[in-house]
Image (cartoon, rainbow, N blue to C red):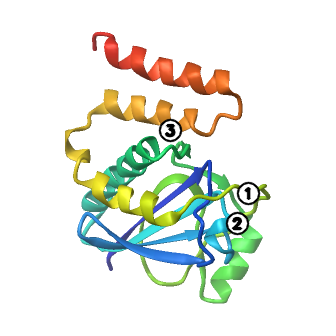
């Protein structure tokens, strides 16, 4: 069975699209971007990228790491705040629900905010719940930026990744002072000795 990269992140501005899903090619692989539930992308601050067919877990982890960096780069370049998460489950259902799903031939997996790598069987189910007000952004610029940023990720180290995460979070900050503080922190982080 092939491995899947699932990357779930929050954006400061939803994509201006009535579509519930869009496809893009990122790093030579087809990726499907979708919002929460089956809502149009313009109504979702949460986006999930799914990329199937990776050969093994190590390849999936490396590819997923680069996808996550490409999202941060695209967000910084296109003034879209990104909350990349910490690769942890945001919600989970108890054993009773998981067992009931299994009886129906479905596999209940955790809804991870960030990067989640799993061996795909085709019967996976993810649950996600939230409520948000919406301000949207045209998807073409952001999604094209994500795809073009992918090629720049190999040279980015841990320091650059941390700085990009700070810049991305600054775009989600609701207060201008918080945005400025996070951007200054990113510059200070890069300017200090390793």
Going from the N terminus, do you reach mark 1 or mark 2 first? Answer: 2
**Quarter occupied by the C terminus:** top left
Rounded to the nearest angstrom, the CA distance separating label 1 from label 2 is: 6 Å
Q: Residue at x 40, y 49 (%)?
A: 74
Q: Position of residue 57 (x, y in %)?
A: 30, 62
**Crowding near pointer 3: few (<14 within 10 Å), some, many (20+)?**
many
Give whichever of 194, 77 is nearer the camera: 77
Rounded to the nearest angstrom, the CA distance separating label 2 from label 3 is: 20 Å
Whether the residues at callouts 1 and 2 have beta carbons within 8 Å, the answer is yes
Residue of label 2:
43
Whether the residues at callouts 3 and 1 have beta carbons within 8 Å, the answer is no
Tag 1, which secondary structure? loop
Please indicate whether residue 101 sits to the left or right of residue 163 in the image: right
Residue 53 tag number: none
Q: Position of residue 193 (x, y in %)?
A: 28, 10
Tag 3, which secondary structure? helix
**Crowding near pointer 1: few (<14 within 10 Å), some, many (20+)?**
some
Q: Position of residue 110 (x, y in %)?
A: 60, 62
Q: Residue at x 60, y 66 (%)?
A: 16
Residue of label 1:
134
Relative to residue 67, is residue 118 depicted above or below? below
Q: Is residue 64 visible?
A: yes
Please indicate whether residue 156 sits to the left or right of residue 139 in the image: left
Q: Is residue 85 visible?
A: no
Residue of label 3:
168
Residue farthest left in this picture: 155
Please indicate whether residue 1 sits to the left or right of residue 35 in the image: left
């Amino acid at each position: 069975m092939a491995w899947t990269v699932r990357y779930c992140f929050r954006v400061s501005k939803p994509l201006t699209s009535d579509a519930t899903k869009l496809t893009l090619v990122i790093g030579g692989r087809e990726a499907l971007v979708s919002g929460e539930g089956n809502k149009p992308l313009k109504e979702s601050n949460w986006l999930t990228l799914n990329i199937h067919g990776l050969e093994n877990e190590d390849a999936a982890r490396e590819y997923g790491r680069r996808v996550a960096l490409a999202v941060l780069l695209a967000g910084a370049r296109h003034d879209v705040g990104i909350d990349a998460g910490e690769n942890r489950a945001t919600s989970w259902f108890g054993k009773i629900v998981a067992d009931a799903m299994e009886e129906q031939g479905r596999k209940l997996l955790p809804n991870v905010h960030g990067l989640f790598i799993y061996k795909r069987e085709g019967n996976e189910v993810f649950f996600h719940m939230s409520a948000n007000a919406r301000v949207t952004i045209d998807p073409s610029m952001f999604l094209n930026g994500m795809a073009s940023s992918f090629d720049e990720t190999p040279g980015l180290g841990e320091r650059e990744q941390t700085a990009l995460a700070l810049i991305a979070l600054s775009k989600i900050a609701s207060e201008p002072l918080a945005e400025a503080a996070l951007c200054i922190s990113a510059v200070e982080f890069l300017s200090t000795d390793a």
